[in-house]
Image (tube, rainbow, N blue to C red):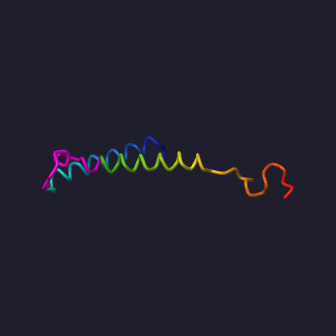
Amino acid sequence: MTVKKVLITCAAVLIISVVLEIAFVTHKTYYWWHEVTGFSLIYGLVGCAVLIVAAKLLGKLIQRKENYYDGGEDGDV
């Protein structure tokens, strides 16, 4: 599956979810941002994207070389 197809599929699912929220969900809100239609959906999507990007960056920062436990470049161990 190409990146374009994945993005189109995610956008379609997001739009369908917002339409279903408008049609069927009644909110009791305490804060104004909870009244914004689709706020929870967008917040969750952005949160997941941030977690994925952070995990990839963290993995690149702490990843060890393939021969780290073999004693480095020498191989004399």
Q: Residue at 74% of width from left, 57% of height from top?
A: 69
- Residue 63 location in percent, x, y? 62, 50
20 and 54: which one is in front?
A: 54
Q: Quadrant of residue 28?
A: bottom left
| Left or right of 17 on screen, residue 58 | right
Q: State the residue lying farthest toward the top.
A: 4
Residue 37 vs residue 7: left or right?
Answer: left
Give percent across and percent down for residue 44: 32, 51
Please state the horizontal and vertical placement of residue 76, each as a whole percent of the image.
87, 55
Q: What x and y, as percent, mark residue 72? A: 78, 51
Is residue 39 part of the magenta span, yes or no? yes
Q: 73 left or right of 18?
A: right
Residue depicted at 44% across the width and 40% down the height: 4
Number of numbered discs? 0
Q: Residue at x 15, y 56 (%)?
A: 24
Give the residues in magenta. Answer: 27-42
- Closer to the camera, 48 or 77? 77
Q: Looking at the image, which residue is at 20% across and 53% down?
A: 20
- Left or right of residue 24, residue 49 in this image: right
> In the picture, residue 68 is in which quadrant?
bottom right
Q: Quadrant of the C terminus?
A: bottom right
Using the image as rendered, state which of residue 16 and residue 32 is in the foreground: 32
> Is 21 contained in the magenta span?
no
The furthest residue to the right: 76
